Amino acid sequence: MKAFREFSADELRFVEQFKIAEQRFEPGQTVLVEGEKSPYLYTVLSGWAFKYKMLEDGRRQIINYALPGDLLGLQSAMSEPMQHSVEAVSETTLCVFAKDKVWDLYKEHYALGFDITWIAAHEKAILAEFLVSVGQRTASERIAFLLLLLFRRARSVGLVRGGMLELPLTQEHFADTIGFSLVHTNKRLRRLKRAGAFAWVGQTFTMLDEKSLQEQAGDSCSVPLKRPFI
């Protein structure tokens, strides 16, 4: 895919040896658990997942979404307990790596080590945008920003066809991401839909006017043209 930088022949051989399996997860199945250490590191090959934290009273805050090409479990790979959990939204296939080989990656392939650093830094940048949303954006701006960001991320990895995207998320996911009640999220989402920038029926999201949605989001929501892939 054009979104990812190319491997050198040596890097490709290393990554092929680094990979130990592929694993499938059903919708709603937990991939990683907050507070636990996993012996594995994952790359999403297909499907959608989300990262979240749970409060003691059962409230959930979604902090990011994982699409094909995204890395999961990096904290655990560095021998730290996971600071969040990960759950599959749709049927998801993950590439599985043994975390005890991560240091070999850094020692033998400096460019791949830099790639992991880039991935971690980029994820922090997305978290910063989500923090801005929860702290400063209005409800409509939060929804518009999230829709635009997810649409552009999905498009960069070939999931958009003719402006249409199979979006497996529910309004509950959106409410737990933007920090509003389900009722308030539903009202704001319906108001945005009436503005005509997009259509969303079932799991089919159709972008009708990207520039208009961007104006409503109040941000450019840029997605890197090229990015690393492990």
Image (spheres, grey):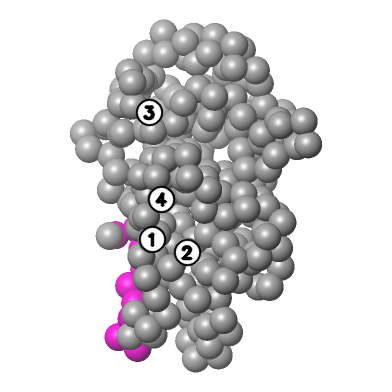
Residue occupying the far right of the picture: 56
Quadrant placement of the N terminus? bottom left
In the rendered image, which residue does mark 2 sit on?
42
The crowding category of the residue bearing disc 2, from other C-alpha atoms within 10 Å (few below 14, some 14 to 19, many at least 20), is many
Note whether 41 is above or below 123 in the view shown: below
Q: Mark 1 to mark 2: distance in Å?
A: 9 Å
Q: Mark 1 to mark 4: distance in Å?
A: 7 Å
Q: Residue at x 28, y 39 (%)?
A: 160
Q: Earlier in the sequence, mark 3 or mark 2?
A: 2
The crowding category of the residue bearing disc 3, from other C-alpha atoms within 10 Å (few below 14, some 14 to 19, many at least 20), is some
Q: Mark 3 to mark 2: distance in Å?
A: 32 Å
The type of residue carrying mark 4 is Phe
Looking at the image, do the residues carrying marks 1 and 2 touch, with CB atoms under 8 Å apart?
A: yes
Q: Earlier in the sequence, mark 1 or mark 2?
A: 1
The answer to whether residue 136 is left or right of residue 185 is: right
Q: Mark 3 to mark 1: distance in Å?
A: 35 Å
In the rendered image, which residue does mark 1 sit on?
23
Task: Please identify, in this view, whether the residue under mark 3 or under mark 1 is nearer the observer.
Answer: 1
Looking at the image, do the residues carrying marks 1 and 4 touch, with CB atoms under 8 Å apart?
A: yes
The type of residue carrying mark 1 is Gln
Q: Earlier in the sequence, mark 4 or mark 2?
A: 4
Which secondary structure, mark 3?
helix
Q: Which mark is residue 25?
A: 4
Task: Please identify, in this view, whether the residue under mark 4 or under mark 2 is nearer the observer.
Answer: 4
Note whether 53 is above or below 204 in the view shown: below
Q: Residue at x 46, y 73 (%)?
A: 97
Q: Residue at x 61, y 61 (%)?
A: 121
Residue 207 x/y as whole percent: 33, 26
Q: Earlier in the sequence, mark 3 or mark 1?
A: 1
Note whether 44 is above or below 129 in the view shown: below
The crowding category of the residue bearing disc 1, from other C-alpha atoms within 10 Å (few below 14, some 14 to 19, many at least 20), is some
